[in-house]
Image: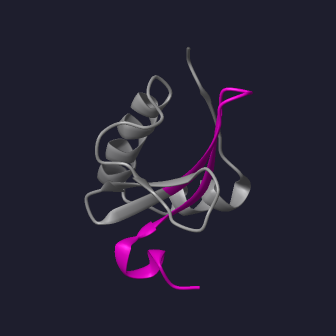
Amino acid sequence: MTYAIVTPKVVQKQLDALPDEIYQRIFKKLEKLTEDPRPDGVTKLKGLEDEYRIRIGDYRVRYKINDSELLILLVQCKHRKDSYRK
């Protein structure tokens, strides 16, 4: 089963602002998520339903998984220093 990735405009802007090298690393990890949305190294976020975080270098990508529709919704892609601020 292959999951589709949905990237809202807000998250796409965050991705577009990244340096090319970082963007390519994140893109490769996101491609792997389509085959296995819960690989080793992914953390389930406490207090949030179906929301996960994956570390890619100094960057964190938060996403939600909808297993019934085979969708991955990207929520956020930020540097770790900005990732946990509200």
- Judge by depth and name the residue closer to the eye, 1 or 13: 1
Q: Residue at x 28, y 66 (%)?
A: 58
- Magenta highlight on residue 85: yes
Query: In x, y percent, where is residue 2?
Result: 56, 18
Query: In x, y percent, where is residue 37?
Result: 48, 34
- Judge by depth and name the residue closer to the eye, 6 or 69: 69
Query: Quick check: 47 above or below 9?
Result: below
Query: In x, y percent, where is residue 16?
Result: 53, 56
Task: Give the magenta-colored segment's residue range.
Answer: 62-86
Which residue extends farthest left? 57
* Rendering quarter of residue 75: bottom right
Q: Residue at x 72, y 55 (%)?
A: 9
**Count of marks, rendered view:** 0
- Magenta highlight on residue 45: no
Query: In x, y percent, where is residue 66?
Result: 68, 37
Which residue extends farthest bottom? 86
Q: Residue at x 61, y 50 (%)?
A: 50
Query: Quick check: 1 above or below 58?
Result: above
Query: Quick check: 67 above or below 73?
Result: above
Please identify the quadrant where the N terminus is shown. Answer: top right
Which residue extends farthest top? 1
Q: Is residue 42 left or right of residue 85?
A: left
Q: What color scheme is it?
A: one colour
